[in-house]
Image (cartoon, rainbow, N blue to C red):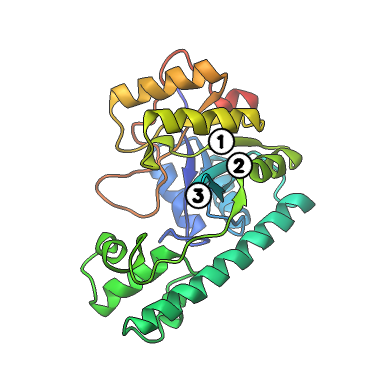
Amino acid sequence: MTKIYDLHCHSTASDGVLSPTEVVQRAAEQGVNVLALCDHDTVCGIDEARLAAKEMGIELVTGVEISTTWEGRGIHIVGLNFDKTHPKMTALLAQQKALREKRALEIGEKLEKAGIPNAYEGAKTLANGEVTRAHYARYLVQLGKVSNDGQAFKRYLGQGKSAFVKAEWVDISTAIETIQAAGGMAVIAHPLRYKLTGKWIRRLITDFKTWGGEAMEISGYGQTKDQRQMLARWANEFGLFGSVGSDFHFPCGWVELGKNLDLPEGVEPIWERF
């Protein structure tokens, strides 16, 4: 039987809307055999997810999605199959937590100046951990300021808007070094979603490989067959393993756990190195 892998999803431990247990249960319902919970800059949901996975008969891979800065842009690096208690990982995630909290407070201050008081407190009621822009977006929808999360980013939270605060994250090389020190593998998350030209994506992959990165996500949601083939060619050209992940955050009509995540032929799967 062919296994179904989904090595990138989120829970209420960061900006997802389902608890770690609910994510695992949904994955089981969708026929997923191997799952990685990759919450943003936290591993707080892993223990709960592991218990649920044991009950559901799913193999759970330890995961995290680390926010990094590269050439002035935010780039996400997924870590897979590492020791979440390793001192270097613990220290890095504590640093990221402090940076995320600082940013969240500044966003709240900007929203207050825009006529929306107590936004931080409101967003915090929707968060199980650190407050993210996604929680602010949901709170703005709840207030009736916007009709959906996307509109919240277009009107308030996106770059250049009144409540935008530039993130201050670690660099990619630090993220890779930390993941590998903890015994894991580093993966470029969703390479085509950074609004980069092909030239700049190749430059990103080149730097990632130079710093010791090992894999890139090739199959995700919303891709065409041609896009997957292009990513597969780049993976082979740069000697990177291929990974797959839905980047599931909440039940919706366009993203589902384990759905359409086939890896193109000719790419070496990252899970063969777990």
Q: Which residue is mark 2?
A: 79
**The residue tagged with tag 2: helix, strand or loop?**
strand
Kindly report which numbered mark, 3 or 2, lies closer to the viewer in this rendering: 3
Kindly report which numbered mark, 1 or 3, lies closer to the viewer in this rendering: 3
Q: Which residue is mark 1?
A: 187
Question: Is residue 196 at least partly visible in the picture?
Answer: yes
Task: Reply above or below: 81 against 147.
Answer: above
Q: Position of residue 51 (x, y in %)?
A: 60, 52
Residue furthest left in the image: 147
Question: Is residue 129 at least partly visible in the picture?
Answer: no
Residue furthest top in the image: 266
Residue neighbourhood size for the residue with mark 1, other residues' Cα within 10 Å, grouped as few (<14), some (14–19), many (≥20): many
Q: Determine whether label 2 and label 1 are within 8 Å by CB.
A: yes
Residue 254, by quadrant, is top left
Closer to the chain start, of discs 1 and 3, is 3
Cα distance, mark 3 to mark 2? 21 Å
**The residue tagged with tag 3: helix, strand or loop?**
loop
Task: Reply above or below: 134 against 84.
Answer: below
What residue is at 45 percent from the left and 60 percent from the top?
A: 15
| The disc label shown at residue 93, or none | none
| The disc label shown at residue 72, or none | 3
Amino acid type for the residue under numbered disc 1: Val
Amino acid type for the residue under numbered disc 2: Gly
In the picture provided, is 92 more to the left or to the right than 12?
right
Cα distance, mark 1 to mark 3? 19 Å
Closer to the chain start, of discs 2 and 1, is 2
Q: Position of residue 198 (x, y in %)?
A: 38, 29
